[in-house]
Image (tube, grey):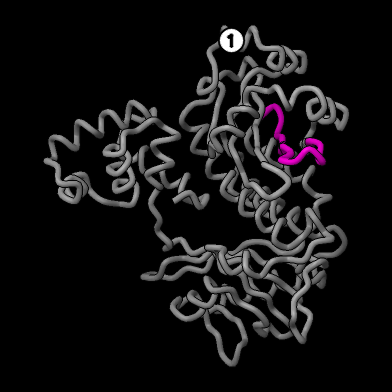
Amino acid sequence: MRTTSIEAFSRMIRSFYAAAVDPGLWGAALRGMEDVTRSAGATMVFVPRTVQDNGIVLAGRFTEDVCAEFARDQMARCPRTEYVNRTGAPLFYDSMIMDEAAMDRDPVYDWYGRLGLRYCIGGHLTTNDRWQVNISLQRTRRQGHVNRADVDGFLQIKSHLAQALDLAEIMGSLRSKERASLQLIEQMPQGVILLGPNKRILYANAAADRMLTTSPLLSVKADIFGLADPTQEARLGGLLFAAVGLSGGEGAEPGGWLTADRSGAAPLHIFVGPVAPSLELSLSVQPMAMLILHDRAMGRRASIAMLTDLFGLTRTEARLAALLGGGAALDAAAIQLGQTTGTARIHLKAIFRKMGVDRQQDLVRVLSGLVSQGLG
């Protein structure tokens, strides 16, 4: 899985958040995901949790007829869907589910084959009271099984997609008749700020309040939001104008990303976008723009339960992997676990084998991709 450029990757991420505001843009967002990952197709599958609902498939370049056929005839018996439903796996690929001979015998894989497809990489995105939502990137037989680089790239993209989908649920764009839940917004690890005219802060969730208080990259005076660096502040102004439709002309993207950074301070990634029309808040002034702040300093460790369930690690191995993924050195992790460094090295070899990596830095990269999705 290779990204074409930083610009293409950024456009794809912006498209996720644009679709969170306007669900009619999910098709374009998934097509962009196909382009960046060079996959044979991107599908977002809504598996119903009640008998009243039918399955739904959103896709990039697959036709509506193909999506409807899968939802109607294949979803309920698909081994991939069954595996994710049963395990809630944040990551899966075909060799985790069955071998090649079993794929050859399976009727759903035969259906995939008639579309020129064979393999995939995917995972669970989110679950609510009606749907379990999964994402898959399809692969042809010629593309073959995924490799470690494919896994790393998928996890990086999936973390942004999951955040955008959660935001879509919160803001009500997927279920526009339901009110947004401020309690859910308060629980988000990302900072959420709603701005009124002249960049006045109308609302900030708990994570945003913490960043506004502690980050030297932000400049807040009399409830007016700003950035400490003048160049970054000018970029913010341009994105805010775009978010409210005052620049760029017809067809311009509504906002975008910027990174606020400075030597000695942890950078903040800030998404600027319009406010969903369906958002209902008890505010005296209608919000004009929304900011989502991602704090890269928010270090989290992978959960022990997730590591044991997903990779088959023992509890001791999972505790060691979590410490290493959180930045601990091997000898320091061994001391914390009451082991010798030699014993820790033995456990580390078993971790490498079960997680399919060869080096400690590869282990850290995989774990970082997992915890960025809120699995810690």
* Lateral position of residue 364 relative to residue 80, left or right: left
Q: Secondary structure at mark 1?
A: helix
Quarter of the N terminus within the rendering = top right
Is 53 covered by the magenta stretch?
yes
> How many labels, in total?
1
The front one of 222 and 375 is 375
Classify residue 29 by image quadrant: top right
How far across and how far down the image is residue 78, in percent?
Answer: 68, 23
In the rendering, at what x and y percent does residue 254 appear?
A: 76, 63
Residue 315 within the segment the image draws in magenta: no
Residue 183 lies in quadrant = bottom right
Q: Residue at x 65, y 17 (%)?
A: 118
Is residue 372 toward the left or the right of residue 44 in the image?
left
Q: Position of residue 155 (x, y in %)?
A: 53, 41
Horizontal side of 40 relative to 329 (left or right) equals right
Figure quadrant of residue 113: top right
Highlighted range, magenta: 39-55
Amino acid type, callout 1 = Ala
Q: Nearer the viewer, residue 22 or 3?
A: 22
Q: Residue at x 49, y 38 (%)?
A: 152
Q: Residue at x 79, y 80 (%)?
A: 286
Q: Position of residue 323 (x, y in %)?
A: 29, 48
Residue that carries the numbered disc 1 in the rendered image? 102
60 or 112, nearer to the observer: 112
Please give the name of the residue rendered at 72% of the width and 56% of the height, measured from the top-left corner. Answer: 168
- At label 1, counting other C-alpha atoms closer than 10 Å, the crowd grade (few under 14, some 14-19, many 20 or more) is few
Farthest residue toward the front?
Answer: 51
Query: In the rendered view, does 70 fall on the left or right side of 373?
Result: right
